Image (cartoon, helix red, strand yellow):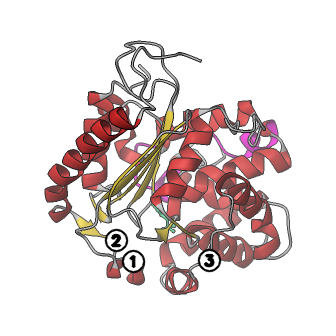
């Protein structure tokens, strides 16, 4: 592990860093006026557009939190990273990749066009809806609850508690799910689904409706930054190969059709969700010893006002600023 010349774990340096992050959150607060809160799932409109919060958790244990840190929100598309991981653990990596590709689409997260136009007969990647619904169909179990048991167990192992299902969000999404049903029927027609359509969609909507906080996202990101291993117990929670694959997918597809720009300007694997959350993963780096979080960290951001791609506007600006200030880019 790289040891910095500056000891970032002292209370003085931590306070100093905290002041910086507080300033940055205050500065980017103005960007919460841009964009819109998601409305295609009606209940998500109730989110407060002004909210912005960040939680950073280092592999070395250092924690910085700022802004609206206590607001619970639903995990939405961020769940896709973790159901992919569970499917790989349950079914094996090569089987999963034989059913879903690992290519970015350059299109919207809920695009159907890509399913139709593509030559290779499988969804593009596990992080767009078509690929994610296919992955959900692969989870073992004959009810939504059984299918999600592995996902819950993974979350519980990392977070230390079982996050609750927000039943109102689930119902709202279930009732307004025309597009996802259309994708589901298309997947069914193509023979991609491994479980019955209604069961698959129920499971998918439920996985998206699990309620978490930015502290949870920071912890999930930190475990991925550490290649799937819990740094305090050295326990392998996610097999290293699967954690690596998840990070590749996050980098190339995690921010949908803004993934290229995110890689260029921020430069770390990340995954967004339409409720306004982003999980970002900064792996360990060995460069300038004067920088914080050299051992790597996970970052959770919440800002429900979204751009056209469905990513948090203020959240991305804040991440970009921090990544530049601390040289987090993996490139
Ligand atoms: N981008 C997202 O977060 C989309 C997730 C949402 N539950 C949907 O399927 O539409």
Q: Secondary structure at mark 1?
A: helix
Q: Is residue 106 above or below residue 33?
A: above
Is residue 110 toward the left or the right of residue 318 in the image? Answer: right
The response on whether ligand 1 sits within 8 Å of label 3 is no
- Name the residue nearer the viewer: 7 or 79: 7
Q: Which mark is residue 165?
A: 3
Q: Which mark is residue 246?
A: none
238 within the magenta span = no
Q: Secondary structure at mark 2?
A: loop
Q: Position of residue 10 (x, y in %)?
A: 42, 32
Is residue 208 toward the left or the right of residue 22 in the image? Answer: right
The mark closer to the camera, 3 or 2, is 3
The response on whether ligand 1 sits within 8 Å of label 2 is yes
- Closer to the chain start, of discs 1 and 3, is 1
- Alpha-carbon neighbours of circle 1 within 10 Å: few (<14), some, or many (≥20)? many
Q: Position of residue 190 (x, y in %)?
A: 69, 59
- Closer to the chain start, of discs 3 and 2, is 2
Q: Secondary structure at mark 3?
A: loop
Q: Are marks 2 and 1 in contact (CB under 8 Å)?
A: yes
Mark 1 lies on residue: 44
The residues tagged by marks 1 and 3 sit, at their Cα atoms, a distance apart of 15 Å
């Amino acid at each position: 592990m790289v040891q910095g010349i500056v000891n970032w774990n002292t209370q003085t340096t931590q306070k100093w860093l905290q002041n910086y992050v507080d300033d940055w959150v205050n500065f980017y607060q103005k960007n919460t006026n841009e964009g819109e809160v998601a409305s295609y799932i009606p209940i998500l409109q109730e989110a407060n557009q002004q909210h912005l919060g960040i939680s950073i958790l280092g592999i070395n244990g250092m924690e910085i939190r700022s802004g609206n840190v206590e607001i619970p929100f639903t995990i939405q598309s961020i769940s896709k990273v973790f159901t992919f991981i569970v499917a790989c653990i349950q079914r094996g990596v090569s089987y999963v990749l034989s059913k879903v590709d690992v290519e970015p689409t350059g299109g919207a997260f809920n695009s159907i066009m890509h399913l139709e136009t593509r030559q290779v007969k499988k969804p593009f990647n596990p992080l767009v809806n078509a690929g994610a619904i296919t992955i959900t169909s692969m989870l073992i179990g004959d009810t939504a609850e059984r299918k999600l048991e592995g996902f819950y167990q993974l979350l519980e192992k990392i977070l230390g508690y079982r996050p609750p299902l927000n039943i109102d969000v689930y119902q709202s999404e279930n009732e307004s799910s025309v597009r996802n049903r259309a994708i589901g029927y298309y997947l069914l027609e193509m023979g991609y689904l491994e479980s019955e359509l209604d069961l698959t969609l129920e499971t998918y909507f439920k996985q998206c409706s699990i309620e978490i906080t930015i502290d949870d996202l920071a912890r999930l990101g930190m475990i991925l930054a550490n290649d799937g291993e819990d740094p305090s117990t050295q326990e392998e929670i996610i097999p290293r190969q699967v954690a690596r694959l998840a990070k590749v997918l996050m980098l190339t597809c995690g921010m949908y059709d803004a993934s290229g720009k995110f890689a260029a300007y921020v430069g770390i694997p990340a995954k967004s969700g339409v409720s306004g959350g982003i999980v970002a993963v900064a792996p360990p780096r060995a460069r300038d010893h004067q920088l914080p979080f050299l051992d790597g960290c996970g970052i959770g951001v919440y800002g429900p006002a979204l751009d056209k791609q469905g990513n948090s506007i203020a959240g991305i600006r804040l991440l970009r600023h921090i990544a530049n200030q601390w040289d987090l880019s993996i490139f």
